[in-house]
Image: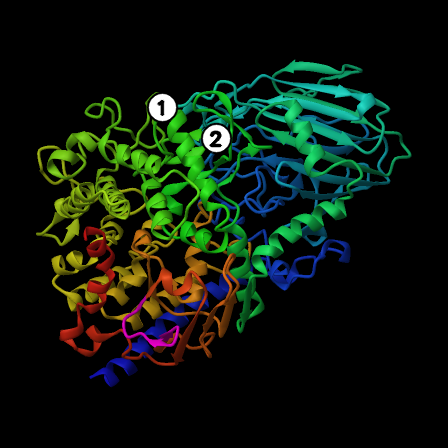
């Protein structure tokens, strides 16, 4: 009976949770919590915003390894900023970010374009204050600091640096999208100076930091204008991807508040100084300017561009013009964050819960980032400057899952430009982006831009050419890469063209799977291509391309199960001749467990393959109880929600709470896996609201368990709020009933139309497991397929 299930099931859940939470709490004791963060002065807390005050930029930056935490850069800038400014504790490259919370020295302040820890830096500029003899070598210019004397917010950062002379330098920082604003206050520091690094030894790849190239840049000092300008062509990912971007550079113009008493050029490798020299071109190059010994404070504003020094100067004058105080810059940036975060009001939950949530929203509004400047942008695809809006930092294999859906809700004004940017990449380069970091990098697998575009059209986004969009996704689905039968397209393979759907002609088009003996990650590719076919078919149906819709939707179903091994009950990659490649072969950031559940577009058929709902629920139990769920990687993110689709919603509620407690908290180690441009945080955001987009192009969300008593969201361009009430949710995980806009909902599904224009969602919560949405667990076999059938409805509508 359900009563017995309710008692035993809940007790087991509590025992499991207690043991895991005890471990989590033990770990948290040694980590920095939000409560000990130093708060900024009142000049940097205007306008008042409780939501912005709860942002902790350090969340996801701890860990002693690249995958030890979120790999997040604790930077200062407005939403989707082109350049993010961060204190530099390390030389960054693929697998290393500029700042790590475990470090104890700061070497400068970096305007970074590194979008994720596993991607490279591009065209950065570093500003480093000092006193006495100029230090240009990275190791020599580091100064100790304490987190007790460090302030980090979304709009303002400050830290007290201990100079070797015994004095201190108070460094403060804010930024606009294309300009940084720094202020250095020298206390008992003789001969103050500021050094600007133009070029350095650039690390290639992640395996060996001694494997470097030496980009050639330039720097110019103009004492009469109190400016230092330069160019940095570093692009660490140049060794991968099909686009050379030969003219790419990051340009900068730094303008100072104080006159220079002397200046010169410095070598960053051996520390050699050339006093009095005003310009130079070369490797490992910096310029420095010195100030009168009586100068106690220096204000530095740095315009940045991907087009030219002149454009960098224009960006500076436009965004942080002369006469702008650091307080004003910080206020404008804080206003930009408050405009978004203040739209979300939360009742219930602890201070740490609020910090985790609002920081997740902060993370989710950073990428992709702006690449255009005054209506123009540099395109590395054809090495030209074009007119229009442009974005880069597209981690699409990650972000198609949930952060795109969140951005459609909270930042709808950005979506047309982001789609248009992808279409420009297609026009200028030949294909839609997979992982764009200035240009295409061929990182990850699948052509999930197909999903982004289909979801945008499904949810009514306009402002871009839909026919061009369909042309682009159709090409993804039908045109294989060069030498498709001979190139593996392994991770970060060098010297190859566009990867796109590697294996499309060998043998996906003919036999239905990607051959593991020809291509890397063949199992994952097969399932990703099947989902992308579903997205293309859905878009075709929305655009009334009936025959294409039928073809791609049918192919999405047949190819999915071409690698289902009926004998084992798991997905398994296959070789070109049809033989099985082995259970461990061909997976991307996952294994046969994660990918057997990776059938979000044809869930009903997957359940049938696994013997029906009851058998499928047991299979999910084996997955979680056997320790196979790996939330640090994205292929596992939707899996807890599959219980709901199989008629076991109460188990989704348990697993979601369990995953949350283990993988998220309000400390520097508060993300168990890499943030990946907002996807880790998007899972938390949607889960906290009580629903998650399991199939992004279905227009539906699967119901889980809300975390707060009440959440009110004033969505942009919407006249009424979206209100989610769930009294007692902070303590009670189980859903007893659900109403959506006055309608009782019996199955755990909410549609985009239910929430997109505001709405009223009411959860009744319970301390113990309930029968709502859990027909399979109470033995109601006649209802077992209702949830999965409803989930599959978008496919049927698309076919019509």
- Please identify the quadrant where the N terminus is shown: bottom left
- Identify the residue position indicated by label 1 in the image: 494
Q: Residues within 10 Å of mark 2 (few under 14, many from 20)?
A: many
Q: Is residue 289 above or below residue 55?
A: above
Residue 636 falls left or right of residue 235: left
> Mark 2 falls on what kind of element?
loop
Dot in front, 1 or 2: 2
- Which mark is on residue 438? 2
How many badges with numbers are in the image?
Answer: 2
> Mark 1 falls on what kind of element?
loop
Q: Which of the two labelled residues, at mark 1 and mark 2, occupies the earlier sequence position?
A: 2
Residue 787 falls left or right of residue 231: left
The residue lying toward the viewer, choosing from 488 and 411, is 411
Residue 399: x, y in percent? 40, 46
State how the image is colored: rainbow
Residue 741 within the magenta-colored segment of the rendering: yes
What's drawn in magenta, residue-wise?
A: 739-749
Indicate the quadrant where residue 394 lies: top left
Residue 788: x, y in percent? 21, 63
Q: Is residue 423 above or below residue 735?
A: above
Discs 1, 2 touching: Cβ within 8 Å: no
- Which mark is on residue 778? none
Residue located 62% across and 22% down the image: 231
Residue 16 falls left or right of residue 573: right
Residue located 52% across and 49% down the image: 365
Residue 372: x, y in percent? 55, 33
Q: Residues within 10 Å of mark 1 (few under 14, many from 20)?
A: some
Residue 7 within the magenta-colored segment of the rendering: no
- Asked if residue 545 shows in the view, the reply is yes
Residue located 44% across and 43% down the image: 463
Q: Is residue 312 above or below residue 341?
A: above
């Amino acid at each position: 009976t359900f009563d017995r299930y309710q008692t035993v099931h809940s007790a087991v859940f509590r025992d499991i949770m207690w043991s895991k939470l005890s471990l989590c709490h033990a770990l948290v004791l040694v980590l920095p919590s939000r409560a000990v963060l130093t708060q900024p002065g009142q000049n940097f807390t205007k306008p008042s915003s409780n939501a912005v005050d709860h942002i902790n930029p350090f969340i996801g930056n701890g860990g002693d390894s690249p995958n030890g935490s979120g790999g997040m850069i604790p930077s200062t800038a407005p939403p989707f900023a082109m350049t993010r400014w961060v204190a530099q504790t390390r030389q960054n490259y693929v697998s290393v970010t500029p700042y790590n919370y475990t470090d104890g020295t700061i070497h400068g302040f970096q305007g970074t374009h590194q979008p994720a820890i596993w991607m490279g830096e591009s065209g950065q500029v570093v500003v480093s204050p000092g006193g006495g003899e100029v230090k240009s070598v990275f190791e020599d210019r580091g100064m100790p600091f304490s987190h007790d004397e460090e302030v980090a917010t979304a709009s303002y950062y400050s830290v007290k640096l201990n100079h070797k002379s015994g004095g201190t330098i108070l460094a403060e920082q804010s930024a606009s999208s294309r300009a940084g604003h720094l202020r250095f206050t020298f206390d008992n520091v003789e001969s103050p100076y500021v050094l600007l690094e133009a070029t350095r030894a650039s690390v290639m790849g992640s395996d060996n930091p001694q494997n470097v190239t030496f980009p050639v840049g330039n720097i110019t000092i103009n004492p009469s204008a109190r400016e230092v300008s330069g160019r940095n062509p570093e692009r660490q990912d140049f060794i991968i991807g099909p686009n050379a971007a030969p003219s790419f550079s990051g340009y900068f113009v730094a303008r100072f508040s104080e006159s220079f008493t002397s200046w010169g050029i410095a070598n960053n490798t051996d520390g050699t100084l050339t006093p009095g020299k005003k310009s130079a071109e070369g490797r490992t190059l910096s310029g420095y300017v010195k100030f009168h010994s009586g100068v106690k404070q220096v204000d530095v504003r740095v315009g940045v561009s991907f087009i030219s020094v002149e454009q960098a100067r224009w960006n500076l004058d436009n965004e942080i013009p002369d006469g702008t105080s650091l307080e004003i810059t910080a206020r404008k940036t804080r206003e930009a964050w408050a405009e978004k975060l203040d739209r979300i009001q939360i009742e219930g939950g602890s201070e740490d819960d609020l910090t985790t949530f609002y920081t997740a929203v902060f993370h989710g509004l950073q990428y992709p980032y702006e690449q255009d400047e005054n209506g123009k942008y540099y395109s590395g695809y054809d090495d030209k400057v074009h007119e229009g809006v442009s974005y880069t930092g597209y981690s699409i294999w990650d972000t198609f899952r949930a952060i795109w859906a969140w951005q459609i809700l909270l930042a709808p004004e950005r979506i047309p430009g982001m789609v248009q940017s992808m279409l420009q990449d297609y026009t200028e380069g030949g294909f839609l982006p997979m992982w764009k970091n200035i240009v295409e990098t061929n990182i990850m697998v699948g052509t999930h831009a197909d999903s982004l575009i289909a979801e945008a059209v499904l949810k009514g986004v306009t402002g871009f050419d839909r026919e061009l969009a369909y042309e682009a996704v159709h090409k993804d689905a039908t045109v294989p890469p060069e030498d498709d039968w001979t190139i593996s397209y392994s991770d970060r393979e060098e010297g190859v063209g566009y990867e796109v759907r590697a294996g499309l002609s060998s043998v996906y088009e003919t036999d239905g799977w990607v051959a593991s003996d020809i291509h890397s990650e063949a199992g994952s590719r097969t399932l990703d291509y099947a989902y992308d076919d579903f997205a293309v078919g859905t878009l075709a149906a929305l655009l009334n391309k009936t025959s294409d819709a039928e073809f791609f939707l049918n192919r999405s179903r047949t190819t999915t199960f071409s690698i289902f091994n009926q004998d084992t009950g798991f997905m398994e990659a296959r070789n070109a001749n049809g033989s099985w490649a082995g259970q461990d072969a061909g997976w991307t950031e996952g294994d046969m467990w994660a990918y057997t559940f990776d059938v979000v577009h044809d869930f009903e058929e997957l359940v049938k393959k696994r013997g029906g709902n009851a058998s499928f629920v047991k299979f999910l139990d084996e997955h979680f109880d056997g320790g196979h769920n790996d939330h640090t990687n994205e292929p596992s993110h939707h899996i807890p929600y599959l219980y709901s689709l199989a008629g076991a919603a109460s188990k989704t509620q348990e697993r979601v709470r369990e995953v949350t407690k283990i993988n998220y908290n309000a400390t520097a180690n508060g993300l168990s896996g890499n943030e990946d441009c907002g996807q880790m945080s998007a899972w938390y955001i949607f889960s906290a609201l009580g629903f998650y987009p399991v199939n992004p192009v279905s227009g539906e969300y699967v119901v889980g368990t809300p975390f707060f008593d009440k959440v009110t969201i004033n969505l942009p361009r919407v006249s009424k709020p979206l209100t989610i009430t769930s009294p007692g949710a902070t303590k009670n995980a189980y859903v007893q009933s659900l109403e959506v806009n006055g309608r009782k909902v019996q199955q755990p599904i909410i549609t985009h139309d239910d929430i997109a224009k505001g709405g009223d969602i009411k959860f009744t919560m319970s301390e113990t497991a309930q029968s709502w949405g859990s027909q399979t667990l109470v033995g109601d076999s006649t209802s077992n397929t209702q949830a999965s059938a409803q989930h599959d409805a978008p496919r049927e509508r698309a076919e019509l």
